[in-house]
Amino acid sequence: MMRVTLFTRDGCHLCDVARADLEALQKELPHQLVEVDIATDESLLTRYAVDIPVIKAGPYTLKSPFGPTELRVTLGAAMNGRPQAPDQTAEPADRDRAIILNRAVLGFARHWLAIFNLLIFIYVGLPFAAPALMKLGATTPARWIYTAYSPLCHQLAFRSWFLFGEQAAYPRALAGTNLVPYGVATGLSEADYWQARAFVGNDLIGYKVAFCERDVAIYAGMFLAGLLFSIVRDRLPPLPLLAWFAFGIVPIALDGGSQLLSALPLLSFPARESTPFLRTLTGGLFGIMNIWLAYPFVEEAMKDTRTLVAAKLAGAGLIPGRD
């Protein structure tokens, strides 16, 4: 017997009509009716407030207004295409595990954005703990952080932020900034990349962040865009691919690509070194555009998940909005 979910709420006259129509179709199209009050779940209320009654049968969704004919066609298509047979033999322990799993999935679907933002905050924030620990003399845990992030970033000192020093950054002289160059500040060769990767700083010039300037900007941009998305998530459409490419990919490709090509010995590109400002600008744009492109789709998928799981919990006799 297939399951049919009726999304309803108190005082809905059309819901009463839909319920009666479903009852009239019971002999012709046998089904298990599960009613979900959208007032018990904020996401359902937001999604279906102006559409109820809403019928879900298999892969099909029928929104008001509809009549007996549309209802019969939808249930018939669901029965022929995706019949569903609820397990009537499940042991209590299996049922309890299924309920726990569904509640966990529902909790994640409701709070995915907060979870993502927290993970990104930790990911971009931990590299700043490394210079702080170095300053405090806790060199061992600081080295652990540098080592952990080493496979994820080049960590070149002349392309990284510094804390607790005379300057926030020490770019190469080739960058042409007004800052004291890396070679002058450290006495090290600006052509020695391995040495620049290993150098973490000292008490005079400060200690470098375990992420380079561009990576800090990318993930900080993602975090800030995630916070903004929490405010406009119901009104922000996905970023068009062309805009994502133009504002997210092209700037970072031009800045980083031209710098990379100029460093290859077999090519005759003019020598070029990007600046902390350009690395931050292009990295930030890349991070923000990625969030704008992806998060609206993730939110839509999570809405579908919340709807599906809320219906499952209601079918088990539980109120989706309560633990």
Image: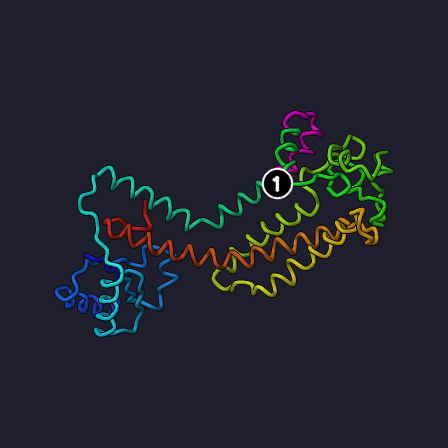
Which residue is depicted at the point 18% across and 47% down?
A: 88
Q: Residue 208, located in which quarter of the rendered image? A: top right
Instruction: Answer left or right for 151 relative to 39.
Output: right
Give the residue drawn at x 77%, y 41%.
158
Q: Nearer the viewer, residue 290 or 169?
A: 290
In the foreground, 122 or 94 = 94
Magenta span of residues: 125-141
User: Residue 211 lies in what quarter of the image?
Assistant: top right
Identify which amino acid the numbered label 1 is placed on. Gly
The residue under the point 69% across, 27% down is: 136
Q: Is residue 135 magenta?
A: yes
Quadrant housing the C terminus: top left
Residue under the image location 49 percent in, 45 percent down: 115
The quadrant the N terminus occupies is bottom left
Q: Secondary structure at mark 1?
A: helix
Residue at the extreme left of the image, as rendered: 27
Is residue 312 inside the magenta stretch? Answer: no
| Residue 219, position as x, y percentages in the image | 61, 47
Mostly what secondary structure, the magenta segment?
helix
Q: Position of residue 257 (x, y in %)?
A: 72, 53
Return the residue at label 1: 125
